[in-house]
Image (cartoon, grey):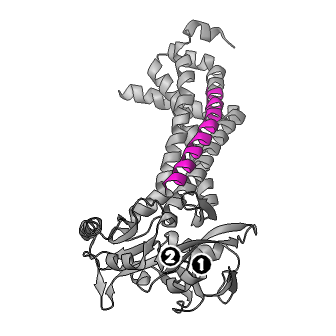
Amino acid sequence: MTKWFSEIVSITQYNLRTIPQRLGASIAAMVGIAGVTLVLVGFLSIAAGFRAAMSVAGADDVAIVLRQGADTEMTSGLSRDETRLIADAPGLARSGDGALSSAELFVIINLPKRSTGTDANVPFRGVEKGAFAIRDVKIIEGRQFTAGRNEVIVGVGAARAFAGLDIGNKIRLGQNEWDVVGIFTGGGGSAESEMWTDAAVLQPAYNRGDSFQSVYAKLASPTAFQQFTNSLTTNPQLKVKAMLQGEFLADQSSMLTTFIEQVGFFIAGMMALGALFGALNTMYSAVAARTREIATLRALGFGKSPVVLSVLLESLILALVGGIVGATIAYLWFDGAKAATINWQTFSQIAFAFAVTPQLLVSAIIWAVTIGLIGGLFPAIRAIRMPIAKALREM
């Protein structure tokens, strides 16, 4: 066994020392694999960032209630009486002011993007006082809006992505002017892409009467969800459904994240084919250039398996270097990059940051190493199938 390992090390060292003689082909293979890694990480970091923007901390104790059969807040509708019945349901956390619930209105407005000036759909949410005790919303600049006034606070993502949302600005929406008085964070969730105001002010501004579209409620504990939802579904006065907020947001982002991941893997797969051919060409050239050397080694008693493994190791090393380079560039280039895209399920813009996670980097490097493994396999097989006598006669 010691002799076997010694042979592998010796041949691999020899192979690596001769890389400068094939520098152009080796660099081409590494660049191809680095490109595959870069593209794969880039696309998947978009999906990871969007998924993070549509998630929210502590969502296991926050429920959202919609009209039965509604898939989004836009297609839901609830009356004032229904929102009161929902707030009275058992299983909710309560304070001195009553149940921690917020009947909310959700409309879409048009604002220009800061980057391009083109109009984009921005979520505009009317909330009740309880919204701030239910969700992890913190004012980081300015102040809270005053109930009963045309004042808005904007999520940090919306303030970054859309023009006119600086504190002190006035924006005209429909027939009304609104004062921007604060900027808030929402725990990194989708709320950071929204504008918030008093629901009682937003209703007449958009001719919504005394109707709402959803109710957000804080549960007494994560285990209280079943009690809460059972009380709603068994109440004959209500035709509603309840979901945990985390599950609801994940469902709202599923279509786009799936599409981005599929496109990313498809494009990376096409590039991987090109990189694979480059790796095959490099390793075939390496084997062809060392035909006599390999035959000489085998004639001296080196076994077939050390030859195969040495060729595979060379290919894997080149692929690993290319993968690490590509992953490093992707991390420096993409991680934290700000962007905004439309959520096809709500037709509203979501501001998010690319997220290059450790899991993405590991997956991309595994992808690169797989390319190297396949790229070195067939040349390695050719190396051991070569008749020794014939190989020794080749120049």
What segment carries the magenta color?
Answer: 254-283
Residue 18 visible in this rendered orientation of the protein: no
Disc 1 residue type (three-letter): Tyr
> Within the magenta stretch, is there residue 351?
no
At x 49%, y 42%, the residue is 366
Q: For the residue labelled by badge 2, is the local secondary structure a helix, a strand or a loop?
A: strand
**Magenta part, dominant SS:** helix
Q: In which quarter of the image is residue 232?
A: bottom left
From the image, tell me which residue sits under label 1: 206
Q: Distance between the residues labelled 2 and 1?
A: 10 Å
At x 59%, y 34%, the residue is 16
Disc 2 residue type (three-letter): Leu
Q: Return the mark for residue 105.
A: 2
Residue 93 in the image: above or below residue 41: below
Residue 72 in the image: above or below residue 302: below
Percent position of residue 389, x then y: 57, 6
The first of marks 2 and 1 along the sequence is 2
- The residue lying toward the viewer, choosing from 317 and 36, is 36
Q: For the residue labelled by badge 1, is the local secondary structure a helix, a strand or a loop?
A: loop
- The residue lying toward the viewer, choosing from 280 and 229, is 229
Percent position of residue 319, x then y: 57, 39
Residue 367 in the image: above or below residue 148: above
Left or right for 287, reference 250: right
Furthest residue toward top = 389
Q: Are marks 2 and 1 in contact (CB under 8 Å)?
A: yes
Percent position of residue 318, x then y: 59, 38
- The residue lying toward the viewer, choosing from 277 and 306, is 277
- Quarter of the C terminus within the rendering: top right
